[in-house]
Amino acid sequence: MTAKEKRETIEHQVEEGVMIFEGLDDAIIGCSEQFGMPSSVVYDKEKCLEIFQSQGMSYEEAQEWFYYNVLGTGGEGSPVFVTRVEDVF
């Protein structure tokens, strides 16, 4: 599935007003569902960092950018970022 197809699929699955980040479509892994909560876009955190690195950032710069400019934009409708077990151990 291409990044564009992922984005289009997710746009039909989540509610209006849910954040979808430009340029991170390749990091989308799905959408979340939780009782009593609106659905959210789910991203692979490490893939987000890889995307930032492909734009010329070091790993440390990518982490700083992620935490401040991506995760830091939280609030209602914000996405979920998953750290896969394989990425920890």
Image: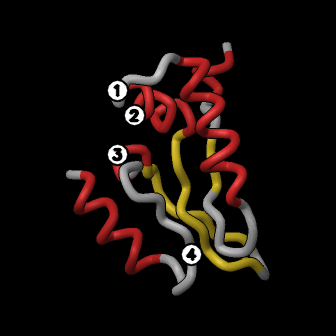
Q: Residue at x 61, y 60 (%)?
A: 79
Disc 4, SS: loop
Q: Residue at x 44, y 33 (%)?
A: 52
Could you tell me how far apart the alpha carbons at marks 3 and 4 are, in whole angstroms?
17 Å
Residue that badge 2 annotates: 51
Residue type beneath disc 3: Asp
Determine which quarter of the picture holds residue 40.
bottom right
Q: Residues within 10 Å of mark 2 (few under 14, many from 20)?
A: some
Determine which quarter of the picture holds residue 13.
bottom left
Residue type beneath disc 2: Ile
Q: Residues within 10 Å of mark 1 (few under 14, many from 20)?
A: few
Residue 81, percent from left and from top: 62, 47
Is the Cβ of the residue at disc 2 closer than 8 Å to that at disc 3? yes
Where is 87 relative to 47, above or below? above
Residue that badge 3 annotates: 26
Disc 3, SS: helix
Looking at the figure, which quarter contains the C terminus? Answer: top right
Q: Earlier in the sequence, mark 3 or mark 4?
A: 4
Q: Earlier in the sequence, mark 4 or mark 2?
A: 4
